[in-house]
Amino acid sequence: MPLTPGWEWGLIPAVPVPFRGRVLAEDALQAYATWMAGHQVAGVAVWAHTGRGPHLSSEQRRRVLAVWRGALPMSPIVAGVTSVQMAAEAKAGGANALLAFPQADDPVGYHAALGRELPVIAFYLYEAAGGVAYDNQTLHAILALPSVMGIKVATLDSVVTFQRIAGLMRHHPDKLLITGEDRFLGYSLTMGARAALIGMGAALTDLQVALMESFRSGDFGRFVRLSGVCDRFASATFIPPMEGYVRRMLWALAADGVIPDDTCDDPWGPSLPPSERDAVRSAVREARTPRLAPA
């Protein structure tokens, strides 16, 4: 499966869905998609873990995909899926590729079945978030499928696991290693990732686009500086309880003026104290200071 043009060294934000209570905030969703369309992203990922895809109703998924397809008519859209039925929904809605939520039962057959609908990105996700610890034999078999274009690796904090999978990718040079490592984004690029599909990219998107470009172009002074900015932002948003990161990303978007303050609910996430929202606001403000902004 050839790489999608523009994905190598590109940022693909996994976008959250703004809610008021349990009601999808369509005004905020449209404003967010319009804002994202002004960034040099390689595409977006809907229905992923950040976008609560498995929890959304079929109609909510359809609406979310329609808004993003309308806002980014020429950009690739990845849809997170757990079944062939969801894959068919994604294809009907105009998605270009699938992010395969991990599955323990016949993972190779599962990826092959999804690939009959659209190109597939495999997903190595840490087990506490519902992932499956695919062994090397399974990973090789998945990556050997013609319909699989690469793998997103999101271990949260296991550099050793990321290094293992990065080494395995040398046997699949035609497939893309995609980082999902919000807590060590810069380092994951130095270890061989050639694209990023991350929840952190949903906010402060321009800084992360600049980080990817600085590494690609060899501007390593700027890369180190931006890595520090992104690491500090991640340290305020990707913290226990980890499921709270979805709400924190919505808070970051509101702090950046992208969505209204009252559209930051995550019906499936934990409740968080007001002090955490203050910390996210401070992290956004720090990242936006002129001395840290991309040149």
Image: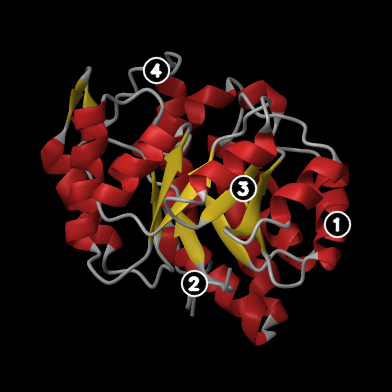
- Using the rendered view, name the quadrant where residue 273 is placed: top left
- In percent of width and height, residue 90 lies at 33, 45
Q: Separation of disc 1 and disc 3 at Cα?
A: 14 Å
Task: Indicate whether 182 appears above or below 217.
Answer: above
- Using the rendered view, name the quadrant where residue 241 is placed: top right
**Residue at the disc numbered 3:** 122
**Which of the two discs, 4 and 3, sits closer to the camera?**
3
**Which of the two discs, 1 and 4, sits closer to the camera?**
1
Left or right, 34 with reference to 171: left
Return the disc, 1 or 4, that comes first in the chain's sequence: 1
Task: Indicate whether 76 appears above or below 230.
Answer: below
**Residue at the disc numbered 1:** 168
Res 110 visible: yes
**Residue at the disc numbered 4:** 268
- Nearest the viewer among 194 and 214 is 194
The residue that appears at 29% across and 24% down in the rendered structure is 265
| The disc label shown at residue 4, or none | 2
In this figure, what is the number of numbered marks? 4
Q: Are marks 2 and 1 in contact (CB under 8 Å)?
A: no
Q: Separation of disc 2 and disc 3 at Cα?
A: 15 Å
The residue that appears at 59% across and 37% down in the rendered structure is 110
Left or right, 122 with reference to 11: right
Return the disc, 1 or 3, that comes first in the chain's sequence: 3
Residue neighbourhood size for the residue with mark 2, other residues' Cα within 10 Å, grouped as few (<14), some (14–19), many (≥20): some
| The disc label shown at residue 113, or none | none
- In percent of width and height, residue 84 lies at 43, 36
Q: Which amino acid does label 4 sit on?
A: Trp
Task: Indicate whether 276 appears above or below 151.
Answer: above
- Nearest the viewer among 150 and 39 is 150
